[in-house]
Amino acid sequence: MANSRVVVVGGGLAGLACTMKLCELGIPVDLVSLVPVKRSHSVCAQGGINSCNDQTRQLGDSEWKHFDDTIYGGDFLQHQPPVKEMTDWGPNIIELMDRLAVPFNRTSEGYIDRRRFGGTLYKRTAFSGATTGQQLLYALDEQVRRWESEGLVRKFEYWDFLGPVLDQSGICRGIVAQDLASMEIRSFPGEAVVIASGGPGLVYGRSTMSMMCTGSAASRCMQAGAKYANAEFIQVHPTAIPGADKLRLMSESARGEGGRVWVPRTPQDPRAAKSIPEKERFYFLEERYPKYGNLVPRDIATREIFDICVNENLSVERDRLSVYLDLTHIPAAELDRKLGGILDIYQKFQGVDPRTVPMKIFPAVHYSMGGLWANYERTPAGGMRPASPVNQVTNIPNLYAIGECDYHYHGANRLGANSLLSCIFSGLFLAPGLQTLILNAPHGSVRDVDASVFAGAVANQQQRHDSMLARTKSTENPYLIHRQLGDLMTKAATVVRRNEQLEAAYEKVSELHARALNCGMSDTGSWTNQNIVFAKALEDMFPLAKSIVKGALQRDECRGAHYKPAFAMPALEARDDEGRRAEAEGWCDRFEANNRKWLKSTIATWNGSHPDLTYEDVDTSILPPRPRLYGLVGAEMIESVWKMRTASNEAARRIQQSTT
Amino acid sequence: MIKDAYNETIKTFRVEVVRQNRPGERPYSEVFSVEYEPDMNVISVLQKIAARPVTVAGKPTTPVAWDCGCLEEVCGACTMVINGQVRQSCSALVDQLLAVEPRQIRLEPMGKFPVIRDLVVDRKRIFHNLKRVRAWVEVDGYFSMGPGPNQGQHQQEENYPLSECMSCGCCMEACPQFLKIDKTQMSGESENEFSKRVQPDFDQGFLGAHAISQAVLFNNHPIGKLSAGERLDALTAPGGIQLCGNAQNCVAVCPKHIPLTTSIGRAGRAVTIDKLKKIFGA
């Protein structure tokens, strides 16, 4: 094991969790990251991490219910075994992170405190103030530093992953990366390569993501032949602070701690928020979803906020769309203890104290449910087999994907506080699988690979670099093209999607792509050239942008975050019960027909200039799909028809069983 | 439009950047004229310069190199010296800067760390200092071992602020005892060779408030406490807490308002008690 090195690309929660577990198993790691790993984007996660726990258990919660909430929240688009394994592991992961010194908030008796998050009725979320991601990341960073000081980890920080190295048989043998200071390009051989590079927020220009979240690493794998799945499923977070350089997240935990979303009933009411009387406020989420209230899942909250501002013209301000997120009814001391971090961010960047004045927020691109396609090995019980080298492997042997850049776990919509869990889980769970891979070496060892394979891969990247530097005559500017790409993507492929817009957007993205491939460099130097590094990342945003737009264009349905009004399920209109029942029957027929057609993962493969799309069945064998209504007012009849349908199907199945 | 400190409406403002092409080379300064927009921060200023890298004199130049990450002051990447003050550039809002110092913003790299290029500095030493004080808990392993030790709210409230430290380097930049170690990787030198060459200097240099405070954090954790002695030894080794001159600059510049001087005081007491115990064999 000591001579069998694994290369991990990315040092956020997933990459660090995997690295530390590999070290525990005695497997040395080369950890390659664009930024010092302590500065990875995981620091931006605020609200918390979910698991079933002793308190919720006594209220009827279980790992199964966490699984159910996650699948229902994801609109049934996830393969269910990986999700089941993850939710089963949830309690253990929180206990582990507690032992690793994450300062979780405590109850007065000294237990880990929990709060509620979207898409569940249980208080599952453990939290560390409102900087939970930062705290979890630091704990893992510290453990990896411990292994680094013992010589098991070599860190390569400020290195840009340029691509996987594949041998003649298409097996991944390592990576090529570039030092961002010296611009040296070299290879890193490995028995396996783990991509843990996070999300592609920069494809949308401004988002809640950090500046290194370009998606380029996943894209470079895709261009090397890896499949990319469910690209069109992009989460738009309901509550962010608009900004010129970034849309800063305002955590769902604000609502988890009692924050209320509202708009004045009078459009653009000029009065100060606090002086608008209660009866003149429209708490639209609470009125439309009395069961979940402000904690409906993110896709629903986002659409409702969008609808209230755009279609109902109830935005707080006319020229800058926003709604109120109000915490002012909660005592300031409690807010400081549980939400201090995010309130400081709001105050710092907006100059207003959210403890006394309601915040103005609007949705922003936040997370990619889609990512590199990965496999898993199912157990008969419906989980994922521990220590199987099949788990998390892409279609390229020895190339693995974990964390946000992997498509498992969140389906068509991710529940809040599930991403920290999926990142840590997939990292920890993968490590023993890699140990098995190294022990059995089904594809041989990297030690037997000819050096020319690596030299060739380095030469290709050097050639790409040199030819970009040589484009001195071009006037195309990568920063301006990036801004145009962001505007285009934000307009066409976020909350509301329309086929004519998507079609036009695909053409424009393709035009921009051609121009991006011809960008000139304003810096042609060979030392810390950030200009060419950005231009490269920009070029590599396009395969993902195209996959997102094409995936959205072809998927003629509504599922989770993917919403096309032209294909929305109709609301019930009849006034009388009988009429409503008939409509609900029709609704359920259409629901079932739609699932037969569209309950499939979108698989994109890169053909050199465009993504080719195919569709793959989803393993829904553990929990059958059902309408996802979250107790919407007016949709009760659908729920009741669906229940009867399921019961009679079940009865028919039993009769059939007893007669055969 | 906002008005600056001279009560004049701002259309453009000047940005002076102290630049340096490579480690060891002479710094020089370039001035840019930037069009004013509402809600700008220093990051969006640098983004504008990158998109059109032309100095105020009309001379085309290269985009300014700088470090950034989260843009919401939790990652620590974008630390630099802005109008003479060390801070994160993401939370340095242009309106606030111009309201105090009209018409011009001056950006310099941190002075206590070697410059790689322009505003990018090499802060490896910060992370190395975390190794010196063993800033981690030594758990048996990552297997499921049941819940961690019960901890009271007061303990969480003591530890959480220390744990918010993002290793940005502000406290070291402001500290008169924390001296620059001006060594960077040379061309042709591997990371490994460089780290061997620089390590003896790193090991002798002052730990700084950052690492001292992290040692205090782990010594105050129920599992971390079990190896408190090793951290106290590290705090009294060469470059340790004895070098602190009590200038208290660290706590004044910390963007996260971490009670660094309280940490140093706690570390000092713990070290003294530990020494006495060793003398009297208790």
Image (cartoon, coloured by chain):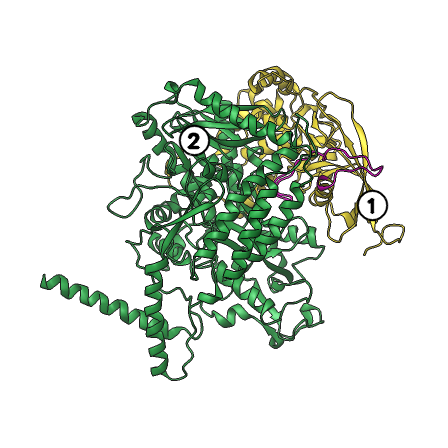
Mark 1: secondary structure: strand
- Residue A411 visible in this rendered orientation of the protein: yes
For the record, the magenta segment spans: B50-76
Which residue bears the numbered disc 1?
Answer: B13
- Residue B72 visible in this rendered orientation of the protein: no
| Residue A198 % position (x, y) | 50, 41
Q: Quadrant of residue B268?
A: top right
Q: Is residue B15 above or below residue A301?
A: above
Query: What secondary structure do most residues of the magenta stretch adopt?
Result: loop
Q: Quadrant of the N terminus of chain B?
A: bottom right
The residue furthest bottom is A576
The residue furthest left is A660
Q: Amino acid at mark 2?
A: Val
Q: Nearer the viewer, residue A371 or A225?
A: A225
Which residue bears the numbered disc 2?
Answer: A193
| Disc 2 residue crowd, few under 14, some 14–19, many 20+, Cα 10 Å | many
Q: Amino acid at mark 1?
A: Phe
Mark 2: secondary structure: strand
